Amino acid sequence: MNTKLVLTTTAFVAIVSVILSQTNTLHNLFAPPSIDGSKDQLHTCKIVHVTGAFGPESLAFDPNGEGPYTGVADGRVLKWRGDDLGWTDFAVTTSQRKECVRPFAPEMEHLCGRPLGLRFDKKTGDLYIADAYFGLLVVGPEGGLATQLVTEAEGQPLCFTNDMDIDDHEDVIYFTDSSTVFQRRQFMGSILSGDKTGRLLTYNKSTKEVKVLLRDLAFANGVALSKDRTFVLVAETATARILRYWLRGPNTGKVDVFAELPGYPDNIRRNSNGEFWVALHSKTTLLGKVVNFNSWVGKALLKLPLSFKQVHSMLIGGKVHATAIKLSEKGEVLQVLEDSEGKTMRFISEIEEKDGKLWMGSVMMPFIGVHNL
Ligand SMILES: *[C@@H]1O[C@H](CO)[C@@H](O)[C@H](O)[C@H]1NC(C)=O
């Protein structure tokens, strides 16, 4: 990194900071844009605190309809047992948990585990867990210590396992490794540096074979199969797109762009109609776009003495918000729900639709939200 570049970027960041904090007109240029047809309703959702925990990223209901279950920042998977009983411990991804006592301690994640994507096998009731540090794991319907299934693919270790979906006809699991360079707690580094080492993979439950379907992805994130299982979607967070990988039919093995989104997609979950709910970590801002097309800007930002909070705030345009998008089976936008001022919900990581309600997780909040449709 040469001095000129650091100076240029410092100036750029200083200008952006000043603009974000003071100038109203220009503020709008950097603030998250509004989305046509969006309904600003999510602030009315009901909050369910994950008492003593933080960052309920993914949500899953078991085959009996109980839950949801969620993975939190201290490495546990919790089960919601209703208003009276609250949350109880369900599973862990490592037995070495003596030091895993603080709700949010990123420096401990590689020891305590960080469960992200959760999915139940509908036939067996087993819970599959994508743990950012411990790979793909499974735990039986009674919970407890999960068993590690996959830690590497084609000779390369998993570095940031993120999300998955299960094809229960074929007994195959599709899952993502967001990066082979950056771990979860360095996710900003992956986004800002233009890292394109994410992968979409499959795990065959009977042969235990792991294959790479797609590589060179810019932060591979959420995964969802289509209802007819002809394709699997993968969120490419850094480019604000959802890619479609064809599993059957004339395009088998090909990939195309399923949707271009007004924000950074996290998990994708299908509803019973075969439509997809996509949780946006945040909307894309002008600065986000600049970073996406000029990776030197992001790399320079990373070298500056800025805290995670400051960089994150700049990228989201200095304004917290929550955005949920429903896509059709063809990738058309059907519905956009927002809490545009982040009054209640912020940084949604997943939306699970069940019985007329949307259950929303957030990797950066100590609660989940429940919205009545
Ligand atoms: C998984 O492995 C089994 C056993 O070899 C095979 O029959 C099946 O086709 C494989 N599934 C997929 C989707 O590749």
Image (cartoon, rainbow, N blue to C red):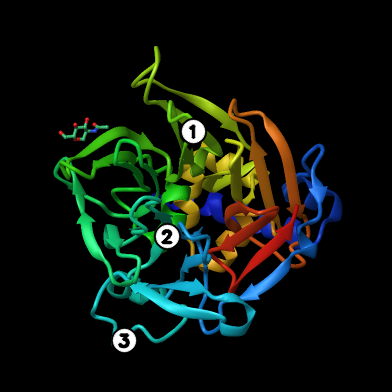
Q: Nearer the viewer, mark 3 or mark 2?
A: 2
In the rendering, which numbered label is found on residue 226?
1
Instruction: Tell me the CA gap for discs 3 and 1.
Output: 41 Å
**Local crowd at mark 3 within 10 Å, few (<14), some, or many (≥20)?**
few
In this view, the mark in front (1 or 2):
1
Residue 262 percent across, percent down from the top left: 66, 39
Residue 65 seen in the current view: yes
The residue carrying mark 3 is 99
Is 230 or 235 nearer to us in this picture?
230
CB under 8 Å between callouts 3 and 2? no
From the viewer's perspective, tell me whether residue 40 is left or right of residue 83.
right
Identify which residue is drawn at 64% across, 54% down. 316
Instruction: Give the image location of residue 165, x and y in percent.
Output: 40, 45
Position of 106 compared to 344: left or right?
A: left
Taking depth in this image into account, of 297 and 49 the one nearest to the observer is 49
Q: Is mark 3 within 8 Å of ligand 1?
A: no
Q: Is residue 246 above or below residue 31?
A: above
Q: Would you say the residues marked 1 and 2 are in contact, meaning their CB atoms lie under 8 Å apart?
A: no
Element under disc 1: loop
Determine which residue is flagged by label 2.
116
Choose top left, top right, bottom left or bottom right for residue 114: bottom left
Q: Is residue 109 above or below residue 190?
A: below
